[in-house]
Image (cartoon, rainbow, N blue to C red):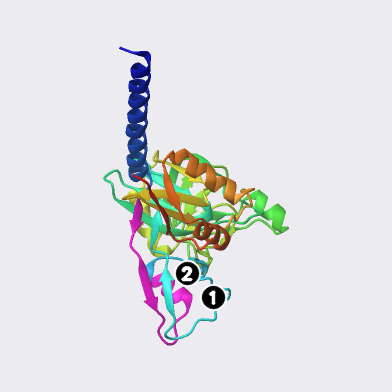
Amino acid sequence: MKKETVLFLTILILSSSFKVRAQEEVQKTLDYLPLIGKDTSYQVIQGEGLYEIARKFDISYMSIALANQISDPNRIYAGQKLVLPTRTILPKKLNEGVLINIPEYRLYFFQGDDSIKVYPVCIGLPTWRTPTGEFSITHKIKNPTWYMPDAIAEKEKVKKEIVPPGPLNPLGDFWIGTDLRHTGIHSTIIPMSIGRALSHGCVRLYPEDIEVLFPLTEVGMTGEVIYEPIKLTVREDSLFLEVYPDVYEMVQDYEKEMNEKLRLLNLPLNLDQSKIETILQEKRGIPVFIGIVIK
């Protein structure tokens, strides 16, 4: 066999192998980062506010404001049509346990049977950040007592206090302790804080949400807190991009981060660059179609 023929066959085999790997990567992306939920639109009823609408759909009022580019959540009007952020790209998949993505103010609970529960949360202040990393649930308490941590008393320059269970307890009715330093998952007596960065590092849920989550968790169950403001996935040869504001100012260059994610896909793509630039600038927190995989 001539050298030219051998070289051609080698290139052909390598090319075919690359295509197979590319197809496998697409499948991994589809399995790893699915789109979950469904698109929802809503028309405002007379007298409604974003907070009331948010509670109806178990999302935060700030996420509705972000999705619709509403600068003042108090200024909406009857008949106004809203996009509700009820569809999202899963930032990571766990076999079981709790996943919290800080920039999107969401907690995902994986039950091990492919079912995923999604809850809006409150995270730590930019000056008192919720830590990232893997964790385990160490203990669970119903109707907890709140012992003000020394760090809060010192920073706020107040006297340490102990608050028994009841309507004034900032932990609400349920506490899920973790081995992340000074960080737990709990209810709240300030439900309007959901969707905002207002805690001292803990993760708060709506009272009705943690009432469901609490019995599903177990001591020893694992989880992870991640920081992922840019989410990208492929679905049926279509690319979707979902971007959030950098609440803790940890992303130096959104465009660079985006390009790195595209590089890792390792696929031939036909992209709408103008739309990508708009998404990166607006950061609305909803998945948007940006292009296709070239076959």
Q: What residue do we see at 54% from left, 75% from top?
A: 73
Q: Report the disc number at residue 64.
A: 2
Amino acid type indicated by mark 2: Ile
Q: What residue do we see at 40% from left, 57% from top?
A: 88
Q: Quadrant of the C terminus?
A: top left
- The location of residue 196, given as percent across then percent down, is 55, 62
Local crowd at mark 1 within 10 Å, few (<14), some, or many (≥20)? some
- The location of residue 254, given as percent across then percent down, is 59, 51
- The location of residue 275, given as percent across then percent down, is 50, 60
Q: Report the disc number at residue 87.
A: none
Q: CA distance from mark 2 to mark 1?
A: 9 Å
Q: What residue do we see at 40% from left, 84% from top?
A: 45
Identify whether 222 is placed above or below 126.
above
Local crowd at mark 2 within 10 Å, few (<14), some, or many (≥20)? many
Q: Which residue is mark 1?
A: 73
Identify whether 253 is placed above or below 264.
below
Give the side of residue 26 with respect to residue 196, left or right: left
What secondary structure is found at the residue carrying circle 2? helix
The magenta segment: 34-56
